Image (spheres, helix red, strand yellow):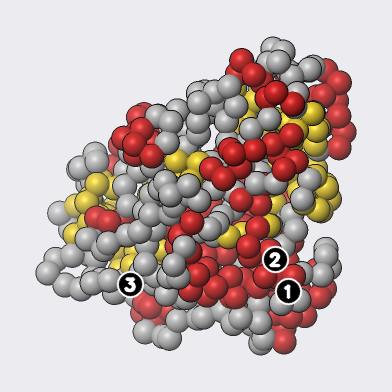
Amino acid sequence: MSTSGNGGSKRTTGIVPSTVYKHQNAYADVVVVGGGWSGCAAAMAAKKAGAERVLVLERSDSLLGTGLVGGIMRNNGRFVATEEMFALGAGELLKVCDDTARHRNVDFPGHKHAAFYDVAHIEPAARRCLLEHGIEIWLIARVTSAHRGGTNSITGVALENGSFVEGNVFMDATGTVGGQSWCTEAGNGCVMCVVRCPTFGPRVSLTGLVGIPERMGTRPDGGVGAMSGSCKLAKDTLRPDIIAEMERTGVAIVPIPEHLVHEEKLGLKACQQYALPEYAHNIILLDTGQVKLMTSYIPLEQLRQIPGLEEVRYLDPYSGTIGNSMRYSQLSPRDDAMHVRGPVDNLFCGGEKAGLLVGHTEAMVTGTVAGHNAVRYLAGKEPLILPDTLCVGDAITYVREEMEQPGGLSKKYTFSGSVYFQRMKQKGFYDGPKPEVYHERVAKAGLTNVFAQNILEPAKVM
């Protein structure tokens, strides 16, 4: 990591809590604000494209954000997107997910050939991957302001601890989870979601800091935002036979007594691919190392009335009785190169900031495009727009266009279900788990390994 002060500099590497650099300055060619899946993918893409110094600023003490409690990969159309990304030359982080999978080729209601990565091991594995590629990471590095220096470009960002980071191009991967006040206003109050906003400070939008207006997602009932779609339970509080079934197959389905069924909750989910009747009439549990409960929330008193769950306990969110983290509070306006539209020219975005495209795979896709195009911006080259002959390119364009239509902000899009998966099937993108088909599609587009190409000579970066 490069730091400088009074004209001097030193070089260190690895993960460093930003408290070590209090009141010192740093510089990077590409500065990624937010260390979730999108930010990690953007950093990886920028480094592979030739950026010499890539720095990830993460406000908490670990990477991956909601990826720390997620884990579902390769289900339905995500298999297609995953293999397209491998063929495009951006498979490193997806391979990390494959390598840490507890279960592969799992079918559960509405979903086929899924893989579940282990949430206990995924963050160290992803962190090692970034470090091995020479990417620098600052933890506990909350950005509080952005500086433009009287130009149309961001020149740097200030951190809460007094540090200042200069850069040539910036990436907003800050996510859209609402802070405490927003959760209270739009949801069921602060329920201590995985982003731990009281501990590390509320999430801050880089796009918002430079004065670019952002939009909010909405719910079908007219409310703003959407609630996270799953909870995490302590595995050792379940009945042994349910644990055994999950560990054997990856999934356990437990019927809900009829008097506890509430189908109206399905409309609250951010993850609309799981808003199916089966999820209202059954407790669906997935083995991601912990137990992933596929519902936004359910009162603990009711959960414990279900046979086998009499002693169950929530791990995340602790207040899963009343609600979950609220998301889609700030969506950045962007084009199909993931460039943020507004009065600055060196800002890109990915993940949930880029729109209502939900999921880890989806975040890696948009993050990769953003990170790659950030380096193309540095090189003075035209951005790469993925074609609509690939599902990853079609999704980026389709979601942007749909969000601009009346009612478009109330929908959620994903490769694995709901609106966009139906489109994938209609357009012939999805043909089951057939990697060779999707790799050939990328080859026909002339884009094999495009994200693996160094497009910037480090010596030319000033």
What is the secondary structure assignment of the residue under circle 3?
loop
Q: Which of the marked residues, 3 or 2, is nearer the chain's N terminus?
A: 3
* Residue at (43% x, 49% y) in the render: 222
One can see residue 15 in this view: no
User: Which amino acid type is shown beneath numbered disc 2?
Assistant: Gln
Q: Which residue is mark 3?
A: 341
In the rendered image, residue 310, in percent from the top left (x then y), is placed at 72, 13
In the displayed structure, 402 sits above or below 210; it is below
| Left or right of 429 on screen, residue 32 | left
Which quadrant of the figure has residue 373?
bottom left
* Residue under numbered circle 2: 422
The label nearer to you, 3 versus 2, is 2
| Amino acid at pointer 1 | Gln
Q: Nearer the viewer, residue 459 or 59?
A: 59
Q: Which residue is mark 1?
A: 426
Q: Name the residue rendered at 39%, 58% in the picture.
A: 331
| Helix, strand or loop status at disc 1 | helix
- Toward the front, the furthest residue is 259
